[in-house]
């Protein structure tokens, strides 16, 4: 299956996935992992890569790309003035703790239970947002230090294990605490960095010297897959970020609801498949 034509087609498909992931990253404040993880996973199937390492490699490489897309997206949102740094100060420590926990768990468990919990909550939140504005709120402001740490830890752990960067979970949480959708998207782009940098390094560590990895792999991060997706994603992320602030709030909220619902369905598919 690894003939030159197949390799070219796979590279083209991953390039397109990089374009889409960058657009999604900027538009919705996510890292684009919801696009990248399945793209990498199925590409590895065509390349006959050992199924035992396939999902971890897809997640690790996705997190590495998210470092690039989140950085370029966050810079654009920050320049527009759509980042709430006070939320990041209270939410960030929990994120980092959750990333450490998620990385440790990823080395010993599949994360099916956590994925099921997230997917169930995501479906409920997507339904809440689908009407155009949140119908249910948990408060007018984010919770105190303990609550923010708890939400951040859950976000970091689940997002690291799923390779999705944390933006989807963060936007969902911020909106139910009455954060305007544009500010939630911009703030979530910085959360993607907090998840992706230590997460990618963690997957390099837990995959170090693992048998069955394809060429150009550093732990569970494949450098060839990273380059093919990272370059177009880096170009598209700022475009998506600028587009997010030109869309009416109702449209952006509904787009995010569809995205979150799709993410949840993909997780359910992974669980039951």
Image (spheres, rainbow, N blue to C red):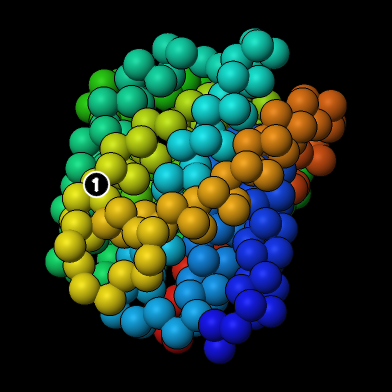
> Is the residue 120 above or below the residue 175 in the image?
below
> Is the residue 52 above or below the residue 177 in the image?
below
Residue receiving disc 1: 202
> Is the residue 222 above or below the residue 26 in the image?
below
As drawn, the residue found furthest toward the front would be 4
Q: Is residue 98 left or right of residue 182?
A: left
Closer to us: 124 or 33: 33
Question: Residue placed at 21% from the left, 36% from the top?
Answer: 97
Q: Which element carries disc 1, helix, strand or loop?
A: helix
Please provide percent x and percent y for residue 159: 39, 50
Question: Residue placed at 50% from the left, 80% from the top?
Answer: 47
Q: Residues within 10 Å of mark 1 (few under 14, many from 20)?
A: many
Q: Is residue 96 left or right of residue 83?
A: left
The quadrant the N terminus occupies is bottom right
Please provide percent x and percent y for residue 199: 31, 44
> Is the residue 41 above or below the residue 101 in the image?
below
Q: Is residue 73 left or right of residue 99?
A: right
Place residue 54 in its image quadrant: bottom left
The quadrant the C terminus occupies is bottom left
Place residue 98 in its image quadrant: top left
Please provide percent x and percent y for residue 175: 56, 34
Question: Residue placed at 75% from the left, 47% from the top?
Answer: 254
**Is residue 30 visible in the rendered structure shown here?**
no
**Is residue 23 visible in the rendered structure shown here?**
yes
């Amino acid at each position: 299956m690894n003939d030159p034509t197949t390799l070219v087609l796979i590279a083209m498909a991953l390039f397109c996935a990089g374009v889409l992931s960058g657009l999604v990253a900027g538009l919705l404040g996510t890292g684009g992992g919801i696009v990248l993880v399945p793209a990498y996973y199925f590409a590895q199937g065509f390349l006959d890569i050992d199924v035992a390492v396939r999902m971890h490699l897809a997640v690790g490489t996705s997190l590495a790309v998210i470092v690039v897309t989140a950085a370029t997206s966050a810079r654009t949102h920050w320049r527009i003035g759509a980042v709430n740094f006070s939320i990041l100060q209270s939410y960030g420590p929990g994120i980092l703790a959750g990333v450490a926990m998620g990385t440790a768990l990823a080395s010993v468990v599949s994360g099916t239970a956590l994925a099921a919990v997230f997917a169930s909550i995501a479906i409920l939140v997507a339904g809440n947002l689908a009407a155009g504005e949140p119908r249910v709120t948990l408060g007018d402001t984010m919770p105190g230090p303990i609550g923010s740490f708890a939400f951040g830890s859950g976000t970091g752990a689940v997002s690291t294990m799923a390779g999705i960067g944390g933006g989807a979970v963060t936007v969902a949480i911020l909106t139910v605490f009455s954060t305007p959708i544009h500010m939630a998207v911009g703030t979530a782009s910085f959360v993607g960095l907090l998840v992706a940098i230590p997460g990618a390094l963690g997957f390099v560590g837990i995959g170090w010297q693992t048998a069955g990895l394809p060429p150009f792999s550093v732990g569970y991060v494949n450098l060839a897959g990273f380059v093919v997706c990272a370059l177009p994603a880096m170009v598209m992320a700022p475009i998506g970020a600028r587009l997010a602030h030109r869309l009416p709030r109702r449209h952006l909220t509904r787009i995010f609801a569809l995205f979150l619902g799709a993410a949840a369905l993909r997780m359910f598919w992974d669980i039951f498949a």
